[in-house]
Amino acid sequence: MVTITNSGYVKRIPLDTYKIQGRGGKGIRAAGMKDEDFVTRLYVTSTHDYLLFFTDQGQVYWKKVYYLPEGSRQAKGKHIANVLEMEPGESISAVIPVRNFQEGYLFMATKQGTVKKTSLQEFSHPRKGGIRALNLDENDALVGVKNTSGDQEIILATRNGNANRFHERTVREMGRTAYGVRGVKLEPGDEVIGMITADSGKQILTLTEKGYGKRTPIEEYRLCNRGGKGVTNIKITDKNGPVKSIKLVDGSEGLMLVTKQGVAIRIKCSDISLVGRATQGVRVIRLEPGDSLAAAAIIIDDETEPSAAVIENLPPPDTDDSKKNAEDALPSEKVEIQALEAKDGVFNLQEELERDITEDIDQEELK
C-alpha cells in the first residue's frame, strides 16, 4: 500500500501490517504526520508496478513501487522531492499507478484548455530523469491527467464557472511531444482549473475562492462538442467568487479545505448541499477579510483500514500479468500481488487466516 500526503510525503507499507477487524472497528493509524498534514492519495498495488508522477511543467517521472521508501504505520515517509529528480519549481499535478503499459491511454488537460490523448505504450520506457509528457505554450501548465480506456467522457471545468463535457473519442491519439488540441473554448481571463471523468451516478463538487460550494449530479451536464464553451457549472457572483477546485465525489468522502492565511477546516461532503448547475452554492467555510480558499483535497482517514479507505486511480486487474508476477515473486511480495487480484483492489486475509488455522490444527492432531 502506497500513501501520499498533502505535504508531499510518500511511503509504502506492507498490507499484512493491517490485521483483520470486525465490521465497525475503529481501525489503526496508517501514517505518522504533522498535525496540519493529511493523506490525500492511497494506492493498493504491487512492488512490481510503477507510479507515474506528472508535474505542472509537463514532465513525467517513473518510480517502481519497490523503490519507494518503506516505513512503519507511524513513519512520516520521505518527501517526494527527495525521491524524484525533479527540476526546481516543479510540483506534482497527478499520480497514475500502472501495471500494464500495453492497454489504455493517458488523457491530459492544461490550464489554457488544451487536451491530449496519448497511448500508455509511449510511457513504457522509464528514464531516471523523466521525459516530456507534452509540450506546453508559455504561461500554460498541466492541471490534470487521467488513465482512460479510450471510451470515456471528460469534463473540463473553468475558473469563470463553465464546464464542458465531451467524449474522449473526439480527441485523436497523439505522440508524447504533441501540443494537443482545444478541449474547451475560454473567454479572456478564464482558465481551466480541473478535469474529471464523467462517471455515472457520481456528483461534481465545486468550490469557489470565497468559500462557497455545491454538489451537482453529473447527469445534469449534457454532452457537448470538444472545443465548445460547455454549460454553466456554477453561477459566479461577487458573493461566491471564481471557481477554485472541482472534485468527483459520491457524497461519502471527507474534505479538507485550506485558506491562503493557513486556516484549515475538515468537513463531510454530505454536509454540502446537492443542488442544480446554475446556482451559487452554499457557504462551506467562513473566511476572514482578505482571505481566500487556497486548496481543497479529498482526504483519507488515517485511522481507517485500506478496505474502508478511498482508493484513487487503481488500474483495472490484469489476470495474465498478475499470475506471472505471482509466480516470480518472493513470498513477501505475494501478499501485495494478491491485493491487486482481490475484488475492488481491497485486500482480504480471511481465507488465508482460516487456511493457516486449519493447518495448525492438523499438525497438532498428528503430534
Image (cartoon, rainbow, N blue to C red):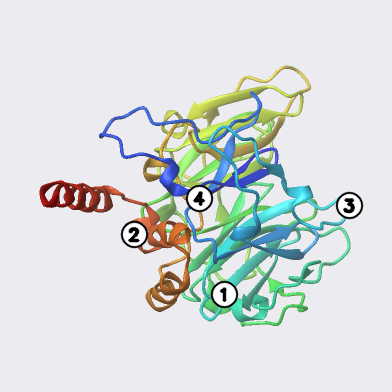
Q: Quadrant of residue 38?
A: top right
Q: Closer to the N terminus: mark 2 or mark 4?
A: 4
- Spatial separation of the CA atoms under disc 1 and disc 2: 24 Å
Q: Which mark is residue 282?
A: none
- Spatial separation of the CA atoms under disc 2 and disc 4: 14 Å
- Spatial separation of the CA atoms under disc 3 and disc 4: 29 Å
Q: Is residue 26 above or below residue 179?
A: above
Q: Are marks 3 and 2 in contact (CB under 8 Å)?
A: no
Q: Is residue 286 above or below residue 272?
A: above
Q: Is residue 342 above or below residue 91?
A: below
Q: Which mark is residue 105?
A: 1
Q: The residue under label 1 is which amino acid type?
A: Tyr
- Secondary structure beneath label 3: loop
Which is closer to the viewer, label 1 or label 2? 2
Which is closer to the viewer, label 3 or label 4? 4
Residue holding disc 2: 342
Q: Are marks 1 and 4 in contact (CB under 8 Å)?
A: no
- Secondary structure beneath label 1: strand
The spot of residue 293 in percent (x, y) is: 69, 31
- Spatial separation of the CA atoms under disc 3 and disc 2: 40 Å
Q: The residue under label 3 is which amino acid type?
A: Pro
The spot of residue 48 in percent (x, y) is: 54, 66
Q: In the rendered image, is residue 355 in sight?
A: yes
Residue holding disc 4: 1
User: Viewed as shown, does residue 127 lie left or right of 271?
Assistant: right
Residue at image position (46%, 50%) is: 311
Residue at image position (43%, 61%) is: 331
- Spatial separation of the CA atoms under disc 1 and disc 3: 28 Å
Residue holding disc 3: 88
